[in-house]
Amino acid sequence: MHTVLLFWIFIAETLFHGYTQHPYIPQPKEIKEVPILCFHHIRPDQPIQQLSPYSVTESAFKADMKILHDSGYHTILPDQLYDYLTKGTPLPPKPVMITFDDNDAEQFTIARPVLQQYGFKAVFFIMTVTIGKPHYMSKTQIKQLADEGNQIGVHTWDHHMVTKYTAADWVKQVDEPRKMLEQIIGKPIPYFAYPYGVWNQQALVELKKRGFKLAFQLSEKIDPHEPLLTVRRMIVAPSYSPQTLLKIMRRDFH
Ligand SMILES: [Zn+2]
């Protein structure tokens, strides 16, 4: 049996122990790691050699969404993932989560219509220092994304790594941005994405203290004690064809 599957069985057993108040107790073997994609910039079509590793072209993004749709994938949101991991609430067939980091305007102008075309919902992790600046989303756009059923998440004030925070930094980088975003969308936000995907044990303690339900990293190992605060994502690289994307999703998430 694959080691990652064994690992998730361990996580599931840990999580479900004591959840007898729920009428449905899932079998640990049913728990699978949901593929989670991470996008940053979506650039106008151009040779991929000119793109940063955090960019995809508009055509590539459209092709990625099309293949997900045509292959029968359903987008899920963090509330659903949390309920699945903690209570075994079933997910739709072939679940995938689509996430965007940093608050780029292209996520609204280019990605949003494509997502809507396929009935997809996504998660937008906002770096709040950028709100309303040129090439970034405005408060109104962020509110609109939330009103349309997407999830807004916290991604710090100005993208400093959480591993270097003082007590004052936690307020400035996490508490205040969270409050600001909650005021913009009018809902609580219990979801966080680590800048650069980087975290440490102290960060897990701080996020837990603040009641975050899920925190998203990139592709480091999941913490065995805090799997919900070290959820893995994969960056979609500019060189991936849609078929490569599917292959990597199936290879890296079990
Ligand atoms: Zn970021």
Image (cartoon, helix red, strand yellow):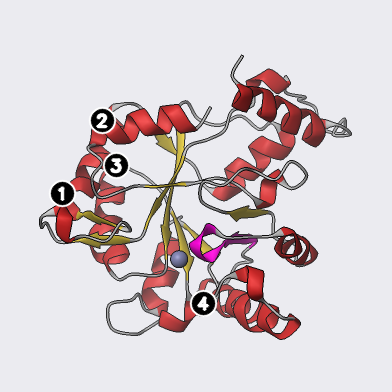
User: What residue sits right under mark 3 in the picture?
Assistant: 118
Instruction: Decide: is 96 above or below 217.
Output: above
Identify residue type, mark 2. Gln
Mark 2–mark 3 Cα distance, whole angstroms, equals: 18 Å
Instruction: Decide: is 217 above or below 169.
Output: above
**Element on which disc 1 rests:** helix
* Numbered tag placed on residue 134 in the rendering: none
The reply to whether callout 2 and callout 3 are in contact (CB within 8 Å) is: no
Identify residue type, mark 4. Ile
Of 36 and 141, which appears nearest the observer? 36
Instruction: Decide: is 165 above or below 15.
Output: below
The reply to whether callout 4 and callout 1 are in contact (CB within 8 Å) is: no
* Residue 53 in the image, given as x and y percentages of width and height: 30, 56
Answer yes or no: is residue 73 visible: no
For marks 4 and 1 on the same chain, the one whose residue lies earlier in the sequence:
1
Mark 3 or 1: in front is 1
User: What residue sits right under mark 1 in the picture?
Assistant: 59
Of 237 and 74, which appears nearest the observer? 237
For marks 2 and 4 on the same chain, the one whose residue lies earlier in the sequence:
4
Q: Does the magenta-highlighted stretch encompass residue 164?
A: no
Determine the image quadrant of residue 133. Answer: bottom left
| Residue appearing at x 53%, y 58% in the figure | 197
Mark 4–mark 1 Cα distance, whole angstroms, equals: 31 Å
Residues packed near mark 1 inside 10 Å, few (<14), some (14 to 19) or many (20 plus): few
For marks 3 and 1 on the same chain, the one whose residue lies earlier in the sequence:
1
| Residue appearing at x 69%, y 44% in the figure | 227
User: What residue sits right under mark 4 in the picture?
Assistant: 184
For marks 1 and 2 on the same chain, the one whose residue lies earlier in the sequence:
1
Give the magenta part as a residue range: 190-197
Instruction: Decide: is 109 above or below 130.
Output: above
Mark 2–mark 4 Cα distance, whole angstroms, equals: 38 Å
